[in-house]
Image (tube, rainbow, N blue to C red):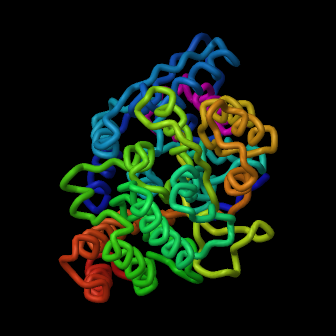
Amino acid sequence: MKRNTSAAIGLAAVAAMALTACSGGGDDDSTGGGATEAAGPVTLTVSGWSLKTTPEFQTLADAFHAKDPNVTIELKEYDPAQYTTLITADLAAGTAPDIVTQKEVKNVSVFQTGGQLMDVSDVVSKLSKDVNGTSSYEIDGKYYGVPYRQDSWMLFYNKDLFDKAGVAYPDGSWTWDDYAQAARDLTTGLKAAGSDALGTYQHSWQSTLQGFASAQTPDADILSGDFEYFAPYYDRVLKLVADGAQVDQGTITTNTLTYQAQFGKQKAAMMPMGSWYVATLIAQAKSGDADTFSWGFAPAPQLDKSTTGTDKTPVTFGDPTAFAINANIDKDKVAAAKEFLAFAASEEAGQALAKIGITPATTTDAVAQTYFAVDGAPTDDLSKFAWTTHKTNPENPTSSKTAATQTILNDMHTAIMTGSTPVDQAIKDAQDRFKSEVGS
């Protein structure tokens, strides 16, 4: 079940400073494939975030220790909102953990350029073909991270609200125009039924529009500096806001709306979101933080009919999450660190992650069966199709220009969605900034 997966200057400067500051075990032997075996018990430190609500780190740590009792994993928790800033500072100071979780693909090139990540090509070369997302960590023919999860964006929908509105469920055949019409029909139907829920909720992130546009538009490439292809996606969602089927950006930010509450508390009947939300929704339904209702997920709406239907392969987007080895790790820990990276990408680790509703990087039939056997997970055929069948294009191409480009695109997104700048002008402004700040 192989899925197809295709900071700017300041951050780079900090990374370069860290290269100068690096010392200790990052010598030639420890940064290549010639790692020496650990002579005795080893303790590895691993960076993570929100450990209470992100159980994947402890799950992998426990599973690995059970497999190799000689190695203990200690987790170092970071603020998820400040993760990149904090981990960059720790790398510069020489206090970063042995294994640095790559939360955002766009920063991999920055860390690699700064000499802060070890070449783990020898680990990648021995991985199963079922591991998705490895290409996101390839720079100049070498690999600097090993993915352990590969999320993809789908369309979550509330079956109870669809029934209340009298609207047919998604069937895998939807384009974005079909989705928009369904959102309007749902809003009208729900209002008639006495509900104040809206047809859909697209969160404030740039990903909710730009990720799909870049993945689904033929030949689209954010690093080309041509952003015209974003226009139809913005025009569509602004029309939904004008029609009252989608919350406006100002309300989202002013009221600090969360996507978990908007869908989980039944404020919206649909929501495009990444597959990580499955685990969150199951957990929140059990804790009472989300309502209990019938739900499922469908393939993301498509650009056109050429990729719709369950006999086709829908196109969506998503970035993997990976573990990388701190180039400054003690030499005696290298072998154990590489062993952990290989384990995290294995089917055995995939099974452990699937049991808690996480979409692992390795997706075999056995992993899929485990995933859908989780108590509270949807069991309908369309949800299974959406999870197992799709082409996932990366949101962030692996390039030293990606972080700066995404900053420009995020500013463009804010300008459009807050209504401060018309779509065409905001796109032109972004293209001009790309030419002056990023270049060709």
Residue 201, horizontal then vertical, whole percent: 41, 60
Please provide the residue range marked out in magenta.
324-346
Task: Residue at 43% x, 70% y: name it.
Answer: 210
At horizontal 64% and vertical 21% (from top left) the residue drawn is: 63
- 332 w.r.t. 144: above or below: above
Name the residue located 78 percent from the left edge and 44 percent from the top edge.
Answer: 364
Residue 341 falls inside the magenta stretch: yes
Q: Which of the two residues, 105 or 372, is positioned nearer the viewer here?
A: 372
The percent position of residue 83, horizontal first and vertical second, equals 33, 41
Question: Is residue 391 something that shows in the picture?
Answer: yes
Q: Residue at x 49, y 70 (%)?
A: 185
As displayed, is residue 104 above or below residue 410? Answer: above
| Residue 159 placement (x, y as % from top left) | 58, 52
Report x, y in % for residue 251.
23, 59
351 sits to left or right of 24: right
**Res. 24 in view:** no
Q: Quadrant of the C terminus?
A: bottom left
How many discs mark residues in the rendered view? 0
Q: Does the stretch in magenta take in 292?
A: no
Q: Nearer the viewer, residue 292 or 91?
A: 292
| As drawn, 149 above or below 348 | below
Q: Quadrant of residue 305?
A: bottom right
Task: Tell me the chief SS of the magenta region.
Answer: helix
